[in-house]
Every structure is written in C-alpha cells, then in structure tokens.
Amino acid sequence: VAAAAGDASAVAGALSIDRFAVMGHSGGGSHALACAALLPERVLGVVVVAGMAPFGAEGLDWFEGFGPGGVAELRAAAAGRAALEKHLAQSDDEPDFTPEDEAALAGEWSWFIDVVRTALAGGTGGFIDDDLAGVGAWGFDPADIVAPALFLHGGRDRVVPAAHGEWLARRCPSAELWLRPDDGHISILNQGAAAMGWLREHADRG
C-alpha cells in the first residue's frame, strides 16, 4: 500500500504540482492515507470514504460486520493469491449492498456500474490486487498523519463496516469522523460533495 505514495508523488511531479489533497473510497482509502502519512510536506488534506482499517488492527474485530460474501472473499485473500483466484472463480456471491446502495446504483450512481465493468474488461487482476492490498501490510501507520483527515462512513455499510472508519479516526490524531447512520457503501457517496468542500476548505488553510 505504501507504494501508492511514490506513485502519487511521481504523477504530481510530472504535472508540476507541489502540494495536493487526496481522497479515496473503499480500497482506495488506504492508498490515500499512504500519501498523507508518507508525503507530509506535500499532502494538504485527506478524505477517506468507507475505507478499511489495516488487517489485524489492534482492538478491532476486523471481520465483524462484513456481509457473508465479503468475509469469504477476504478470508480467501488472506490465504494468498491462489486461494483468492480459486474462490472468485467458484463464487457467485453478490456484493453485500444495502437497499440504500441498490437505490443509489439504480439512480444517481448508475454510471458507477459501467466504470466497474470497464475496469474488469481486461481481467480480474486489478480486483485481486485490491483484495490482497486490503489484507496486506500497509507499510505505514495512520497515527503518523499530520494533515487534516476526514473519515466518512455509512452506518449500514456491509462491504466495509463502519467500525473500520471509527478505528481509523481514533488512530489518526488529526481526524474528523462523519458517520452517516442510514448510509451503506455506495449511498455514502452522496455525501461526497460535502466531503470535497471540507477538503477544499482545509487544503486552502495549508
């Protein structure tokens, strides 16, 4: 996960961007946090939406609150790439979305399905890498983040339980937590504009 910071730094450098803010959803949350932790002189702020805590995080029952499909998939990932590939080839589990998520995907976020479909058109390699990163070592500690950090999470999320966002907010000394009790993993994205406003406000202070 830590390698994401180097990638982001290289892209920003190529674009002549000195300082920047970062935002990540779901599996992208840890990569955004990597940038904030490892590039403290460049990252002005970070938003994590429905992000996972580190695998085996102290004081967190890591699998508690995941839907059954997610538990099976992530346990397979913890057993390694071969086990995960086998699981995905044999599984017909649907994502553990809530009714709120389904409504979001049928409405304003319907385009999200097309993005995922396009991402998987070339194979499941990226999807597998994402799962493996979710259960792998991060290579940094969120406690080292000094930039303003916002953790946004839905209380009904069964893809990444809200306890993960709460753990991260406790771990990160600069954190603010927005817990939306009626949202799931996708419907929480309806709060994205407000989160971007928060990010811009805090980045401007930097």
Image (cartoon, rainbow, N blue to C red):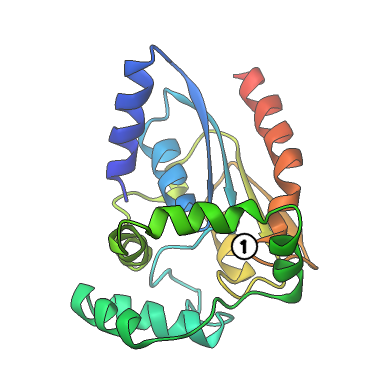
Q: Quadrant of residue 11?
A: top left
Exactly how many numbered labels are in the figure?
1
The part of the image, by quadrant, that contains residue 183 is bottom right
Q: Which of the pair 102/14 is nearer the observer? A: 102
Q: Which residue corresponds to the image point at 39% horizontal and 51% vertical from the top-left? A: 141
| Image coords of residue 13 (percent x, y) | 33, 18
Name the side, left or right, on which 30 lies relative to 180.
Answer: left
Residue at left offset 62%, top offset 24%: 203
Q: x, y percentage for residue 105?
A: 69, 62
User: In front: 146, or 135?
Assistant: 135
Q: Is residue 202 above or below residue 67?
A: above
Note whether residue 101 is visible: yes
Note whether residue 27 is visible: no
* Quarter of the C terminus within the rendering: top right
Query: Quick check: 158 left or right of 10?
Result: right
Residue highlighted by disc 1: 166
Residue under the point 44% across and 53% down = 118
Image side of residue 108 versus residue 172, left or right? right
Badge 1 marks a residue whose secondary structure is helix
Q: Residue 137 or 76: which is nearer the viewer? A: 76
Q: Tell whether 67 sits left or right of 2.
A: right
Residue 102: horizontal and vertical position, in percent? Answer: 71, 70
Residue 69 is situated, as x and y percent measured from the top left of the image, at 49, 84
In this view, the residue farthest toward the top is: 16
The structure residue drawn at horizontal position 39% and vertical position 43%, both measured from the top left corner, is 34
Classify 77 as above or below 29. below
Determine which quarter of the picture holds residue 7: top left
Looking at the picture, which amino acid does disc 1 mark?
A: Glu
| Category of crowding for the residue at label 1, using alpha-carbon neighbours closer than 10 angstroms: few (below 14), some (14–19), many (at least 20) | many
